[in-house]
Amino acid sequence: MTATLKDFDRLIPESTTGRQRYFPRNRRRILCVFPRYSRSFGTLHHAYPLMGRVRAFMPPQGILLVAAYLPDEWEVRFIDENIRPARKSDYRWADVVIVSGMHIQRSQINRINQFAHEAGKITVVGGPSVSGCPEYYPDFDILHLGELGDATDEMIRYLDEKCDRPSTQVRFETKERLPLSEFPTPAYNLINLNQYFLGNVQFSSGCPYRCEFCDIPELYGRNPRLKTPEQVLRELDAMLAAGNPGAIYFVDDNFVGDRRATTKLLPYLIDWQKTNGYPVQFACEATLNLAQSPKLLEMMREAYFCTVFCGIETPETDALRSISKQQNLSIPILDAVKTLNSYGMEVVSGIIMGLDTDTPDTADRILEFIRLSNIPMLTINLLHALPRTPLWRRLEQEGRLVFDENRESNVDFLMPYEDVVEMWRRCITTAYEPEFLYQRFAYNLEHTYPNRIKVPNSPARTSPANIRKGLTILANLLVRVGVFSHYRRTFWQMAYPKLKSGNIEGLIHVGLVGHHLIKFAQECLTGDESASFYSQKLKQPKTAKL
């Protein structure tokens, strides 16, 4: 794959004329399928058996948005294969099968295409993976490249006029994007939100920074595009109508990418929480320099933001410069983490191993950083080069891209490959040893969670459904972890004081998240899990067990 920097910097304009609604002449039955994720650190799948009805991490917003954008006259069904697989009867029902996903889901996307073709159905693939690498999907009938916009309208018209499979692949590429302010509310009516670990909402798209390994600026731009606060509130209302997982994650590439816009949004979120009785916690992704904005932090605290994911990547300053992550150098990292903790926000961190600046001492420095920062959850991954990133282009020029399905990464590291994998294995298994992990949780139980606002015991929070869910999780934790797990003694050292003091919410949070992290680290030690979310190494799917 080759491309020039100019190609990637080409801006896709937004349509300013407003959408002209298309009235179809024919009835169509559209089956939207979201492929199963390969299990990974971030899916938190080991927590699901403790939670009753939960089967998947977050709803797939992109394909739910497309489902909402399709003509009202068409019948639309949605299947998330993380909940259940599409069946032969689903394919027989459909006129058209639409699929979306990320690179990590590539094999599953192509498998869905195969099943749909076996049923004689026309297939469409859209989303970030095909938009970045159309060549990954040679057998699909229609490719939708780019974001929601004029290509989507052309695709709808095509499907209205033609429902037979074309003789050659058809491509629709977005030339004018639909402004985020005109996005419909995702079709939450097609899902049961109670089956998901988290809800999710998008306020902005794009990020002003240009980290070497990240494809967001080149897929979605460096000037964040925005929804209106009123739109966000409508989506929150629609989510609550579809269920309440108890937490909603702002999946923005960078929640504070446009600080003026975030400052405008937060009072709306505060009022919504107060009006609805604080039914959910909020979480977001943000750059670490958020710690330098006390006004934003105070409003986020008032809106009940309890978790913030920060791409720390590495505690080493030279390494941060080498990957163009200078925004993490504007304030000492440990000071920034403590500042966020002081506003009640638990920090979740991304850590990358396999950087060109790594040395044999890197694992020791990362583990010391974990100890000093008291961050409980860190996504420790091997570096992987994504298409449409500066990293990909640099490594391509240096001849350091490796395509081998027996490797965890497509990067030819400067250190020996096996040494890097072993450093990763040591880091993740040590970080999630039960005693070390629970020490960090203990810090946050004492120094972070008490800094959150005291929310009311409103009907939204003490509903019969929430009480049943809480009792189910608590009972499962006390029995499955407290009696049968290998780390039960460590668990009870945390759980008994929390039960005695009535801090059930803290016990449940630590118990659920901690159980996944401990189980995942065990599987990393035995080679049953991948060293990168984007791992090239093929692994057989497994059923989660306690």
Image (cartoon, rainbow, N blue to C red):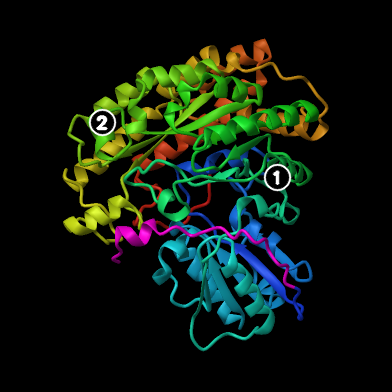
Mark sitting earlier along the chain (1/2): 1
Asked if residue 222 is positioned above or below residue 288 in the image, the reply reads: below
The answer to whether one can see residue 289 in this image is yes
Q: Position of residue 170 (x, y in %)?
A: 51, 79
* Label 1: which secondary element: helix
Q: Is residue 490 left or right of 95 when viewed as pictured?
A: left
Residue 309 within the segment the image draws in magenta: no
* Label 2: which secondary element: helix
Question: Residue at horizontal 19%, vertical 58%?
Answer: 397
Locate the C terminus and report the quarter of the image it occupies.
top right
Q: Amino acid at mark 1?
A: Gln
Q: Amino acid at mark 2?
A: Ala
Point out which mark residue 284 bears.
Answer: none
Q: Position of residue 67 (x, y in %)?
A: 68, 62
Tell me the quarter of the picture where residue 231 sits. Answer: top right
Residue 17 within the segment the image draws in magenta: yes
Nearer to us of marks 1 and 2 is 1
- Are the two marked residues, 1 and 2, in contact with CB atoms closer than 8 angstroms? no
Q: Is residue 154 left or right of 308 when viewed as pictured?
A: right
The answer to whether one can see residue 82 in this image is no
Could you tell me what secondary structure mostly forms the magenta stretch? Answer: loop
Q: Position of residue 388 (x, y in %)?
A: 36, 57
Q: Nearer the viewer, residue 112 or 258?
A: 258
Point out which mark residue 231 bears.
Answer: 1
Q: Position of residue 322 (x, y in %)?
A: 24, 38
What's the magenta region? 1-22
Question: Residue at horizontal 45%, vertical 21%?
Answer: 292
Asked if residue 84 is positioned above or below residue 361 in the image, the reply reads: below
Point out which mark residue 363 bears.
Answer: 2
